[in-house]
Amino acid sequence: MELKQQLKLSQQLIMTPQLQQAIKLLQMSRMELSELVQEELLENPVLEEGAEQRESSVNVAEESAAPEVEAHEAKKEEIDWERYLENQSTEAPMPAMRRGPDEEMPGLEATLSTSEDLTDHLGWQLRMGDFVDDERRFGALVIGNLDDNGYLKIEGIAPEDIVPRLAAESDLDPEDAEEVLAMIQQFDPLGVAARSLQECLMIQAKHYGMDDLVLRVISDHLSDLEKRHYPAIAKALGCSLDEVYDVAQIIAELEPRPARRFQTEEPRYIVPDVYVHRVGDEYYVVANDDGMPKLKISGFYRSAMADNPKAKEYIQDKLRSAQWLIRSIDQRRKTIVKVTECIVEKQQDFFDKGIEHLKPMILRDVAESVGMHESTISRVTSNKYVHTPRGTFELKYFFNSAIKRDNQTDIASESVKQAIKNIISGEDPKAPLSDQRIVEILGQDNIQIARRTVAKYREMLGILSSSKRKKYF
């Protein structure tokens, strides 16, 4: 064994911190980018927010789109960053605007009260009830173990073992625990804390005084009712088919999910990253800069760097970081616009005629057109939204697999889904179309698709099978 020195030349791709930052910014959503910018404004003293100079483009009409298009065309040339930073550093600060007394008040959203959830609603009824301490402890455990639908369920424990387990934890006799549970199940909403759908429906049926036939169907034939095997139910109960139809209508009016009215989700607002405006027969892509901070280099710290040599190294490091952030954000903006322009060009039939004319398209198609890697296109289109004359869509919406057609161009899978939806919406409710029949109808339009694919697309659209769509009354 011996030690030797050796020279070797090699090439390798190294992810610099700046490149990592650019990639990270590219895949961020608009909200995540805004949060990152606010953090950088707090941490980097060299960065500051400039005056907002762009007018709001949320409600831009078609006649006002032309000036924006001209401005967009004028910005296609590369920015002279050195001149930009120098100009920004010498800008005078904007004068502070006086605020009236009302502007100090919190916004309307901050004054809105939160809605009462199921736990609070049941807890209030439990406190108002005539219960002793151990019964209240048991009731609190029951309420704390309700799922989103209002059922009493504990993972890993059989339904029949839940009450004894909770009774032991609250030092309550199991027989008394069953009585307390029955009382809680009479709370509002009726049927809450049931351990199964059958128990939930039975509680409601007894409370409303429904006849014995309804109770027998719920007790013994709920699975047949779900599968709509009405003749089997009529034969087992010795009644007519019309009576079973009446019972099915009555049970359908009961609430299978007691906690439904407490499942209020906060609205989720989507702010598009780009706008597609139609001017005449042409489409133009304009970035949405509303609400995004306009960053610039602080002139104060540039002068401090010149006057104080000790602070020069620190400020230079922060200055480089600020410059890279500004460049990365601008590059992200340009990339999104460039990719969107390519999508609009390839999917122009969709914008002109509708979803039925959406073309098959994969990441490689756009990547080759714009000269980028497929992974870059994937990052650009993730969590990015575009507002178009036909609505607001995620950029990934326009990427679809191809479905073969006989002697014709391929059709996008999203268009096939829409075709299936249109076929089912026009069917006879009393004689719904089977998946195989839908395959045959699509075949008349030269769309060759397997039955299992129709079933998969139908489930993705949230449409039930033909047996469950059938209307008997």
Image: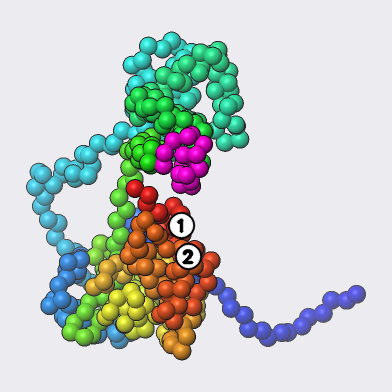
Q: Tell me what residue is drawn at x 34 percent, y 34 percent.
A: 117
Q: Tell me what residue is drawn at x 37 percent, y 77 percent.
A: 358
Q: Of the residues shown, which amino acid type is indicated by label 1?
A: Ser
Q: Secondary structure at mark 2?
A: helix
| Start-end of magenta stretch | 224-241
What residue does disc 2 label?
435
What residue does disc 1 label?
465
Of residues 419 and 324, the one drawn nearer to the viewer in this rendering: 419
Q: Secondary structure at mark 1?
A: loop
On whether residue 88 falls in the magenta region, the answer is no
Asked if residue 63 lies left or right of residue 229, the reply is left
Residue 388 at least partly seen: yes
Farthest residue, direction bottom: 407
Query: Badge 2: few (under 14), some or many (20 or more) residues near its Cα, within 10 Å?
Result: many
CA–CA distance in space, label 2 to label 1? 8 Å
Asked if residue 224 lies left or right of residue 340, the reply is right
